[in-house]
Image (cartoon, helix red, strand yellow):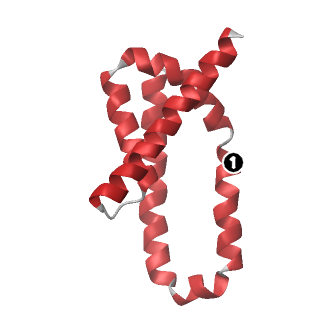
């Protein structure tokens, strides 16, 4: 039971950072995806709060294991809107070439930080 409560608490913390990213983008109009803002906030707080890091470790491991489930829907969307993607191929390619390594870097740094 303790493990389940720990997991739910960690998922709640992760959800709160996602919500914080949404709120910041709505309030400030920052032209960045809310998930990126939430992830940056999460990384910053985790760097400063080792005790909180331990509380979200189990939930982070669970979410990392489910990463494939989060990747499939965008690819389905690309297939559904292939004509529009093709019309904007250069900007889409640039976005993908920039954000894919950036996402990998943030994921690797988060993983490394949580494994300490």
Q: Relative to residue 37, is residue 48 depicted above or below? A: above
Q: Relative to residue 16, is residue 94 depicted above or below? A: below
Assess disc 1: are there few (<14), some (14-19) or many (≥20) residues with their C-alpha within 10 Å of its C-alpha. Answer: few
Would you name the residue on which mark 1 appears?
Answer: 68
Q: Is residue 4 visible?
A: yes
Q: In which quarter of the view is residue 20 placed? A: top left
Residue 100 percent coordinates (x, y) = 49, 57
Residue 93 percent coordinates (x, y) = 49, 74
Q: In which quarter of the view is residue 91 placed? A: bottom left
Residue at 60% over, 17% down: 6
Residue at 58% over, 82% down: 85
Q: Relative to residue 84, is residue 55 depicted above or below? A: above
Secondary structure of the residue carrying numbered label 1:
helix
Residue at 50% over, 85% down: 88
33 and 19: which is toward the camera: 19
Residue at 64% over, 64% down: 74
89 and 76: which is toward the camera: 76
Residue 61 percent coordinates (x, y) = 61, 29
Residue 29 percent coordinates (x, y) = 30, 62
**Left or right placement of residue 76 versus residue 36 in this view:** right
Q: In which quarter of the view is residue 42 placed? A: top left
Tell me how many marks there are.
1
Return the residue found at the far left.
28
Image quarter in which the N terminus is found? top right
**Left or right placement of residue 56 versus residue 51 in this view:** right
């Amino acid at each position: 039971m303790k493990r389940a409560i720990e997991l739910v608490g960690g998922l709640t913390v992760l959800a709160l950072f996602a919500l914080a990213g949404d709120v910041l983008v709505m309030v400030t109009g920052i032209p960045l995806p809310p998930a990126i803002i939430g992830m940056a906030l999460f990384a910053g707080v985790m760097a400063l709060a080792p005790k909180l890091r331990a509380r979200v470790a189990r939930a982070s491991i669970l979410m990392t294991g489910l990463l494939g489930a989060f990747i499939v829907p965008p690819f389905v969307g690309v297939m559904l809107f292939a004509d529009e993607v093709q019309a904007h191929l250069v900007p889409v390619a640039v976005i993908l070439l920039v954000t894919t390594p950036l996402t990998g870097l943030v994921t690797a740094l988060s993983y490394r930080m949580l494994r300490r």
